[in-house]
Image (spheres, rainbow, N blue to C red):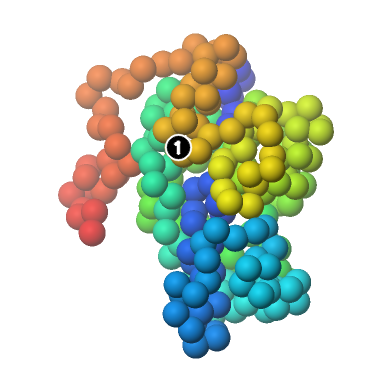
Amino acid sequence: MTGAFILGVDLDGVCADYTAGLRRVVADDRGIDPADLPLERSWGFEEWGLDGPEFERLHRKAVNEDRILATLPVIEGCADALWRLSDAGIWIRIITHRLYTNWSHQSAVADTVRWLDENSIPYRDLCFLGAKPQVEADLYIDDAPHNVSALRAAGNDVICFSQPYNTGIGGLRADDWGQAEEIILDAAAKHAVIQPQFPGIDAGADRLRRNRGESAD
């Protein structure tokens, strides 16, 4: 790994659409239409009427009973962009705080790995922790305002992945994975040589399924 450019990638809100997944659980719990819960929400879900204890209850239910960490929608463009970055020699390090709730660690870890595999997300390392400045990476991409601020305060370069709850965060920002990929490649090119796609190697996030003759359905 000597000389590799390490990209620290957050999952929820960057690769996985946690808002959409929890929305279904909250709507089902309350017996309401999911459309009644706005997607344009703040970090604390105040628009959904959730306080701290209620969020923890519903998050625990979502993880342990509904197993949403295995079924969250993937954010558009994520898998293909990460494969292109990996092919270019960038070391993908997934960093997530999914061990947030006690007594749900087994399902959180198992469902995270399942989700990564089923959505063809490439990675070299998978780290479960909350204090992200403790993880060495050359560049991070995250959506949580407190994580972005803490990482930058520790002297790290961070792309803020745009979400409704982080509009107040300035600095380096990507509105989608197309923009993120350009920023990451530019940063990596200043650090090390970027290698092109090898001739004869399939492109695309579904390459493994295609090579095994599996359907993408």
Decide: is 39 above or below 32.
above
Left or right placement of residue 114 versus residue 198 in this view: right
Q: Residue at x 65, y 26 (%)?
A: 138
Q: Nearer the viewer, residue 68 or 120?
A: 68
Q: Residue at x 57, y 72 (%)?
A: 63
| Farthest residue, direction right | 153
Decide: is 187 above or below 139.
above
Decide: is 127 above or below 104.
above
Residue 117 horizontal/vertical position (percent)? 41, 53
Q: Quadrant of residue 148?
A: top right
Left or right placement of residue 95 versus residue 177 in this view: right
Q: Nearer the viewer, residue 52 or 197?
A: 52
Residue 111 horizontal/vertical position (percent)? 51, 64
Q: Quadrant of residue 88?
A: top left
Give the residue number, with chain letter if any, for mark 1.
177
Residue 161 horizontal/vertical position (percent)? 57, 41
Query: Residue type at mark 1?
Result: Trp
Quarter occupied by the N terminus: top right
Left or right placement of residue 202 versus residue 185 in this view: left
Camera sees residue 186: yes
Per the image, label 1 sits on a secondary structure element best described as: helix
Residue 13 horizontal/vertical position (percent)? 55, 51
